[in-house]
Image (cartoon, rainbow, N blue to C red):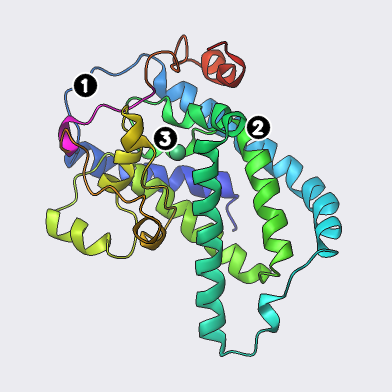
Amino acid sequence: MTLPPWAITLLIIGAFAPLEYFFPRITGRPSIKGRLVAVMVIGAISLVTLSLLNGQLQQVLVPLFLQIKLFSLSKLEIPSPLLFLAGFLLIDLIQYTMHLVSHKVTVLWRMHAIHHADEHVTAASSLLHHPLELIVAYGMILCLYVILGIPILIIAIYGLVNAVHSVFCHANIALPAKLDTALRLLIVTPDMHRTHHSIRMDEGNSNFGQVFTIWDRLFGTYVAHPTTGESALIMGLPEGEKPKTFSFSGLLLLPFARR
Ligand SMILES: [Zn+2]
């Protein structure tokens, strides 16, 4: 039996629930009524929208951008493991760049901001993306994959790894300090990504990395710890950017709200 992607995502989120319960990083904050429902419903809408549009986007964008293909990664005459590594890193660099651009370009930030509206970041927050953001970001990323001729198998494996890692790095868990230090030499950890959700925009505009930490370190966007320390970190959007209510409609309308 093959489970659909949304069921796998829910299973992964569920698997982190006991860890979040027994080893939470942030405790004692009052929970927002209906928060989880709003997050899950928006997550479900985004996943469904994306899967419905997936075929259409591919049909339109792939032939269009095949014409301006710069080179084909799969045609490089290098050993397969090296090709896989190069493709994997290239995809991660594209994801890093797309995330950074989503913070710098106003129209993209308006769509991405709902991901930062959550003041209680947990594993489920990995689902909190505006459907418009997913369509636009996915469309742009797909074009880059085609232009750079990245093999479909590497794209699929990265997608799987990214899905699991995204839930992990949003989970409200306190990893042992030594494990966190060792892991973040290579991959983004929950403490590192939570700093990206800080209400302080200087901290929010850091740690854009998706899976690997190398790009933040290389391009000077790496912030090791929030100024408050990890367990006192205040997350969410600053005043003036917050949704009127943390509800399904409040979040969905956020990109169009007056500021
Ligand atoms: Zn962000």
Residue 179: where, in percent of width, then height?
Answer: 18, 60
Q: Earlier in the sequence, mark 3 or mark 1?
A: 1
Between 227 and 230, the residue placed more toward the observer is 227
Q: What kind of residue is marked 3?
A: Ser
Residue 141: where, in percent of width, then height?
Answer: 65, 52
Residue 186 drawn above or below residue 3: below
Rendered image: mark on residue 132: 2
Q: Which residue is mark 1?
A: 29
* Farthest front residue in view: 220
Q: Is residue 236 magenta?
A: yes
Q: Which region of the structure is painted magenta?
A: 230-237
What is the CA distance from the residue labelled 2 to the residue labelled 3? 17 Å
Q: Which quadrant holds residue 257?
A: top right
Between 222 and 159, the residue placed more toward the observer is 222
Rendered image: mark on residue 125: 3
Between 153 and 16, the residue placed more toward the observer is 153
Task: Give the prevailing secondary structure in the magenta stretch.
Answer: loop
Question: From where the camera sits, is residue 219 visible?
Answer: yes
Residue 89: where, in percent of width, then height?
Answer: 50, 68
Q: Is residue 117 left or right of residue 224?
A: right
Element type where label 1 sits in the image: loop
Few, some or many residues within 10 Å of mark 1 (<14, 14–19, 20+): few
Residue 139 drawn above or below residue 43: below
Q: What kind of residue is marked 1?
A: Arg
Image point 51% across, 45% down: which residue? 99
Ligand number 1: quarter of image: top left
Image point 59% across, 21% down: which residue? 255
Residue 8 drawn above or below residue 108: below
| Discs 2, 3 touching: Cβ within 8 Å | no
What is the CA distance from the residue labelled 2 to the residue labelled 1? 30 Å
